[in-house]
Amino acid sequence: MAPWAGVELSALNPLRALWLALTAAFLLTLVLQLVPAGLVPGCALFQDLIRYGKTKREGPSRSAACRVFDVPKRYFSHFYIISVLWNGFLLWHLTQSLFLGVPFPYWLHGLLRILGAAQFQGSELALSAFLVLVFLWLHSLRRLFECFYVSVFSNAVIHVVQYCFGLVYYVLIGLTVLSQVPMDGRNGVVIHCNHRIPFGDWFEYVSSPNYLAELMIYISMAVTFGFHNLTWWLVVTYVFFSQALSALLSHKFYKSKFVSYPKHRKAFLPFLF
């Protein structure tokens, strides 16, 4: 059975429907280009809309009416200007929300809900979206640099519809990333400051998985440096003992505060310590 079998129709929110429609449109376009010439009636406007740059120049002859809608291909840089500004703006608000508890602007929150933002809890999704948005912004910044200082643009052109689509695409892709952040519980309101016993995932094995994760991060850096790098392994050793100390103190705190604290749970290393 396919993994998506049984998914409710409501799961097809506006954003997914839009991406599905775009996927279907470009798939159909690709199939039509694979069909032998002559089997499908030609359409000058259709060819003009799917070709750009050198493929437009080397494609079917174009009428004067088609050339009216030409835009210089060097305007590609506008896509990345929009992306750097818009997705940088979204990244700023996501950073404020994740690390300072500042809620999204009302209009942005409403827009994300209309598009079908995630309606479930999951801080790991928020962090994943943050990383993806960072990568998207850096990618756009790199492409903008290439447009200004690396790429050599000829007199090639694109259709004005392609130009508008490119502008909308980079606005839409940022909103798509941000829509993966669960909306519920992202208003920055602190319910209480009391301690509770956490359950699930790594908490089933150790009291402080954050300290264990910190150790694993430094071990992964050591692997990157190479197993022979003694200096970094000394750093890892320091991290191990410092995090182990913090984990042990936290473990003792939890055990003293909660009579029903799970007895099988270790402080720092699963099953060991």
Image (spheres, rainbow, N blue to C red):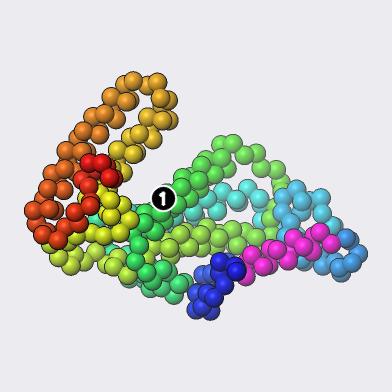
Quadrant of the rendered structure where residue 29 is?
A: bottom right
- Residue at screen point 56% across, 49% down: 77
- Residue at screen point 46% across, 59% down: 177
Could you tell whether 209 is left or right of 259 in the image? right
Residue 157 percent across, percent down from the top left: 70, 52
Whether residue 255 appears in magenta in the rendering, the answer is no
- Residue at screen point 21% across, 33% down: 241
| Range covered by the magenta-colored residues | 21-35
Which residue carries the number 1 mark?
A: 131
Whether residue 26 appears in magenta in the rendering, the answer is yes
* Nearer the observer, 33 or 209: 209
Q: Indicate the quadrant containing the C terminus: top left, top right, bottom left or bottom right.
A: top left
Residue 142 percent across, percent down from the top left: 51, 42
* Nearer the observer, 156 or 107: 107
Is residue 194 among the parts visible in the rendering?
yes
Residue 247 percent across, percent down from the top left: 19, 43
> Magenta part mainly helix, strand or loop?
helix
Above or below for 234 versus 48: above
Could you tell whether 256 is left or right of 92 in the image? left
